[in-house]
Image (tube, grey):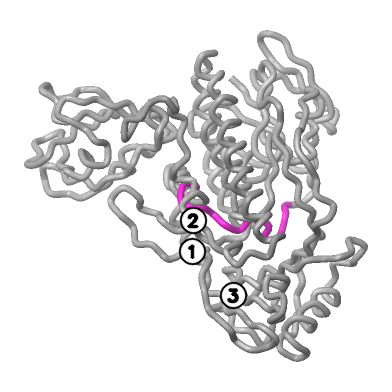
Amino acid sequence: MTVLVAGAGPTGLTLAIELARRGIAVRLIDKATQYFEGSRGDGLQPRTLEVFDDLGVVDEVLRLGRSLPLMRVYLDGKLADERRMAPILEPTPDIPYPNAWMLGQSRTEQILRDKLAEYGVRVELDTEIVGFTQNADAVTAELSTGETVQAQYLVGADGGRSFVRKHLGIAFEGTTDESIRMLLGDVAADGLDHEYGYWFATRDNPMAGIALTPLSGGDQFQFGAPLDDDQVDPSLETLQERVDQYAGPGVAKLRDLTWSTVWRPNVRLAARFRVGRVFIAGDAAHVHPPTGGQGLNTGVQDAYNLGWKLADGREEVLATYETERRTNAMRVLGISEELMQKHVDGEESAMERGENTRQLDVSYRDLSDTRPIAGGDRAPDAPLVDARGNKLRLFDLFRGAHPTLLRFTPTIPSTGEHTVDVVRRDAADGTYTSPEAFAHYHAADGDELLIRPDGYLA
């Protein structure tokens, strides 16, 4: 089987890794002539860190990134407050990565490209899909290089202006709010402590100011400021003018602008995520305001959901992709819109982030099922101790391209691969002690639960 993936951002890269580690031939193309350099989607949510744990890249992500900074709020040039978007939480047995993590998007993409290269797959730049047809057995795609490619499946992860989505004729329903514009960029700022984030505003309008959030791996900040006019050149001089306006002349000297843009809030959701053998994912299927840091994370999880289903190939499995991920995208768009409106309304709570942005509560369960844990729910982590006293985690045993059968105090020891037998105490050979697993899974002796390859209960 061959899968052609158009778009080599975080969504396309995650999908390509998911396929390649299953031994499936995948081609990953991107119309860009060079890799993106900039922070853009720089907030990685806890559920995405769990995905990266399974893919084998979380250690590098944690090493190169940083935690949410303490923000210093200056009003009329004077320090008025210090706050965080969200409290720093301690890991628990079921949630090993409870906090959002900051890493510029281009650095996340580099980590994913390096992992993909371990499977012998590399991104093909300057290669665009310019047409395709499909039948019951395959997709035939025409590339800008003049090549014709035949694949069993095509996935459009080619962004908000997706050629794949447009060629399929899928409606992209939603709005572009022309009344809101933001000036964004990555820039160094002499005079500011890089360990902190900064919010500069006036006391009479504290929510209308500029933000400078430190980026890891250097001395740059991500700059963000509202604009009244989109005919502004997003240059270093323009950013400096905004800093002088809100922070005061001489407070910070900007330099080394490496990326900038004028942004408008797009809130859109594709009417379908699939037509036959062609699928769309990430920004091609849904675009979000940056509020809440949901867009990149939702795309990564689209790919994580779709990869094992393409490998499985059964229609009843493939059909669940659109059902599960479109419903979730609709929910996440609502969260992002609500936070964006709080910014527009000038609410102080607009800067706060809660449980609903961590994406640990994403579930595909039947809403009529009121059990504490049910099919479609995220499979929690738990500490394990084997018969020799070695300590490990359920996530260690879930890691990989396989489903896992989780059995609680079985009467007959398992012999199957990727089967985990858990007892409450005194593990014997082939079993693990974990009273925490019983608690987190609300399990009784004799229960058996199948964990899908993407870490949800089957």
Q: Are marks 2 and 1 in contact (CB under 8 Å)?
A: yes
Residue at numbered disc 2? 354
Residue that protrudes farthest toward the top in the picture: 136
First along the sequence among labels 2 and 1: 1
Q: Which residue is mark 1?
A: 86
- Quarter of the image holding residue 136? top right
For residue 197, the mark is 3
Which three-letter amino acid code belongs to the residue tagged 3?
Gly
Q: Is residue 300 left or right of residue 232?
A: left
Q: Which kind of residue does numbered mark 2 sit on?
A: Gly
Q: Is 55 placed left or right of 445 in the picture?
A: right
Q: Nearer the viewer, residue 272 or 400?
A: 272
| Quarter that holds the N terminus | top right
Disc 3 from disc 2: Cα separation: 19 Å
Residue 183 percent across, percent down from the top left: 79, 65
Nearest to the eye among marks 3 and 2: give it. Answer: 2
